[in-house]
Amino acid sequence: MRNVKKIVLFMLAVVFLAGIVVYSGNRNVTIALKGALVHTVTGSPLENATILIKDGKIEAIGLNVSIPPGAEVIDVTGKSIIPGLIDTHSHMGAYVPNDLNEMPQPIGPENRAIDALHMGTPDWDEAVKGGVTTIVTGPGSGERMGGQSVTIKTFGKDLDKRVLKESGELKMAINGVNLSHIPTIHSNFLKAREYLEKWEKYDSGEKKEPPPVRDLALEALAKALKGEEVVRVHIMWAHDIMSFLKLKDEFGFELQFIHAPEAWKVADEIAKRNVPVICMPIELAINVPESLLKGIVTLHKAGVKLAMHSDHPVSPEKWFRMNASIAIRYGLPKEEALKAVTINPAEIAKIDDRVGSIEKGKDADLVVLNGPWYEATTAVDMVFVDGIMAYDRQQDEEMAEEGL
């Protein structure tokens, strides 16, 4: 009898997976999630609300949503729903750890994470199980300039549709152990400005002379100078943060800080320049002083836009939501903590027109939980990505129990 049950469950799993494939190609499917406490992020939570999904988008959200005939209705009464979580600093997708860095190449802004992205790792599935539906993943911090990140959904059959941005963030790293880091980066930005001026002069002239010799590294930096790429810096200490803020003042590029455990010490300077901080409350280690754990609240009070990160695989993507829970423990208001893993990272990554909140017209990236979103005991029940059920905990646990 047990073997028969295994066979039945296996067949159901095959049918379920086949249904996902069919559904992903059928844009006319309509789903209604009915009865949950919905955290839209951009407004007050809605109790006993309905979310209508059509063609992979959020069609309607509210207390009195009309459900059309033929729609698939999923009863989520007693559960809570939040937008798909967004991690703006991850290293997921590397085939091997060595792919994260191109050492001994210290300056490599032309390198692109999308060119080395590995889609076969099980990490993608684990991220979905944790409710993470979009990540910004890219180079490590082994070089002063590691290259360009890629913004991508964690689930989907069509890679082209999963990629939201092939680049857009230029990763740099100041590790605080080498006096040459800031001067080297400064020198390269000077070269990039000269390179940009040469091309602007050539493009505005009669083009009788040969064009300047192309340099892919300087082209990448020139894009940052033109505002087409955002400079994202792995940085640790307050004095380095101030040095990089001076570089921003000089060159005018858009800047974001990653990790930045001492950012709270210069919070006002960061806020004055509208520089967001992408951080993790535990700052890569548990045994840190209380002042550091409370630093995220200092940044919030100063008006700094905050986002959490996993730094996967340092902290597994599956537990990304817990960063917000820790931040709440140390004083960040619940609504701000939720923003720090949804709409804030979406705005920082410039993808908030599609994801980050539960609003009409946005991608139907949704996480259904069996309790308050911030509680450690709360489990992810279902995850939808572009309106497709990417994860169902009940089915996952039944298959695991039967060894399938």
Image (cartoon, rainbow, N blue to C red):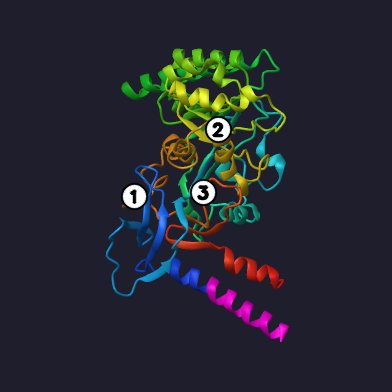
Residue 308: x percent and y percent?
Answer: 54, 36
Number of the label disc, if any, that sits on residue 41: none
Residue 123: x percent and y percent?
Answer: 64, 52
Number of the label disc, if any, that sits on residue 359: 1
Label 3 CA crowd tier, 10 Å (few <14, some 14–19, many 20+): many
**Residue at the image point whose x is 54% and y is 36% from the top:** 328
Residues 81 and 366: in front is 81
Q: Which residue is mark 2?
A: 110
Q: Give the residues in magenta.
A: 1-17
The mark that comes first in sequence, 3 or 1, is: 1
Q: Which residue is mark 3?
A: 373
Cα–Cα span, label 3 and label 1: 18 Å
Left or right, residue 257 beside residue 37? right
Residues 34 and 129: in front is 34
CB within 8 Å, label 3 to label 2: no
Residue 52 in which image quadrant = bottom left
Assess whether residue 8 is covered by the magenta stretch. yes
The mark that comes first in sequence, 3 or 2, is: 2
Q: Is residue 328 above or below residue 253?
A: below
Residue 39: x percent and y percent?
Answer: 41, 48
Label 2 CA crowd tier, 10 Å (few <14, some 14–19, many 20+): some
